[in-house]
Image (cartoon, rainbow, N blue to C red):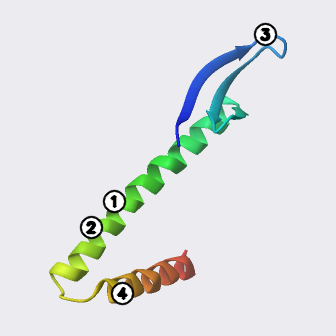
């Protein structure tokens, strides 16, 4: 899927916007909303990399199966949500 993002100024509403398009869809965001989404995407990307390293560590260094490693991550996520 290709996602395109561009800055825009809506002269009729006199406000800056960020336009996000994908699969023929359009989403208009204020700059503040776009910044929140951008931070969320960056955090999710970082988390995904951390998960990958954790899975590889569990498998290679601890010698557990992929299934067990995924189970450990599920327990870790449940614990993290409980203490937040």
Asked whether the beta carbons under mark 2 and mark 3 sit within 8 Å of each other, the answer is no
- Quadrant in the rendering for residue 24: top right
**Which residue is at 57% across, 29% downward?**
5
Determine which residue is flagged by label 1.
49
Check residue 74 in the rendering and tell me which mark sits there, or answer none. Answer: none
Real-space Cα separation, disc 1 to disc 3, in angstroms: 41 Å
- Quadrant in the rendering for residue 47: bottom left
Real-space Cα separation, disc 2 to disc 3, in angstroms: 47 Å
Real-space Cα separation, disc 4 to disc 2, in angstroms: 15 Å
Check residue 53 in the rendering and tell me which mark sits there, or answer none. Answer: 2
Residue farthest to the left?
A: 61
Q: Earlier in the sequence, mark 1 or mark 3?
A: 3
Asked whether the beta carbons under mark 2 and mark 1 sit within 8 Å of each other, the answer is yes
Where is residue 15 shown, x and y percent of the image?
A: 75, 18
Asked whether the beta carbons under mark 3 and mark 4 sit within 8 Å of each other, the answer is no
Check residue 67 in the rendering and tell me which mark sits there, or answer none. Answer: 4
Who is closer to the viewer here, 25 or 27? Answer: 25
**Which residue is at 42% across, 53% downward?**
45
Where is residue 70 shown, x and y percent of the image?
A: 39, 82
Above or below, 52 against 40 in this view is below
Who is closer to the viewer here, 61 or 4? Answer: 4
């Amino acid at each position: 899927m290709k996602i395109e993002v561009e800055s825009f100024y809506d002269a009729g509403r006199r406000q800056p916007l960020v336009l996000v398009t994908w699969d023929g869809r359009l989403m208009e965001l204020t700059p503040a909303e776009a910044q929140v989404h951008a931070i969320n995407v960056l955090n999710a990307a970082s988390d995904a990399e951390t998960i990958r390293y954790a899975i590889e560590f569990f498998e290679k260094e601890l010698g557990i199966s992929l299934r067990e490693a995924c189970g450990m991550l599920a327990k870790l996520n449940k614990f993290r949500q409980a203490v937040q």
